Amino acid sequence: MTTPRDPLQRDRLEERLHRQAMSGDRAAFLRLRGLRRLWRALDANRKSKTRNQGEPR
């Protein structure tokens, strides 16, 4: 499954996985952890691209 680009979809998926993880679903916990790492990396990558746009090469 691909990760949703829409922030609202992303929040809903995160909430659903969080509820499943808190009820003892280990797979949901692992998937949520992986998605949070992926999203953090994507956000950091996006920020670095916008930060570097104005700099001459």
Image (cartoon, grey):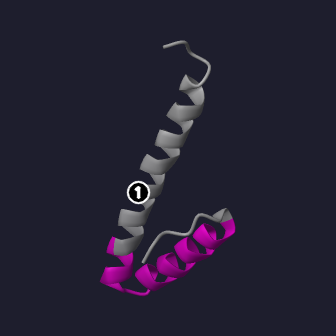
Q: Is residue 15 above or below residue 36?
A: below
Q: Which of the two residues, 11 or 4, is positioned nearer the viewer here?
A: 4
> What residue lies at 54% left-to-right and 24% top-to-bottom?
52
x, y percent for residue 21: 42, 80
Q: Which of the two residues, 12 or 49, is positioned nearer the viewer here?
A: 49
Q: Is residue 19 above or below residue 39?
A: below
Horizontal arrangement in the rendering, residue 16 relative to residue 7 (left or right): left
x, y percent for residue 18: 49, 76
Horizontal arrangement in the rendering, residue 31 relative to residue 11 (left or right): left
Q: Is residue 56 above or below residue 49?
A: above
x, y percent for residue 30: 32, 72
| Prevailing SS of the magenta stretch | helix
> What residue lies at 36% left-to-right and 64% top-to-bottom?
34
Point out the stretch of residues depicted in magenta.
8-30
**Quadrant where the image shows the N terminus:** bottom left
Q: In the rendered image, which quarter is residue 51 located in?
A: top right
Horizontal arrangement in the rendering, residue 47 relative to residue 8 (left or right): left
Amino acid, disc 1 = Leu
Q: Which of the two residues, 44 or 32, is positioned nearer the viewer here?
A: 44
Q: Is residue 40 above or below residue 56?
A: below
Q: Is residue 21 one of those drawn in magenta?
A: yes
Label 1: which secondary element = helix
> What residue lies at 53% left-to-right and 33% top-to-bottom?
49
Disc 1 packing (10 Å; few <14; some 14–19; many ≥20) = few
x, y percent for residue 54: 62, 19
How many marks the image carries: the answer is: 1
Q: Which residue is mark 1?
A: 38
Furthest-front residue in view? 57
> What residue lies at 37% left-to-right and 73% top-to-bottom?
31
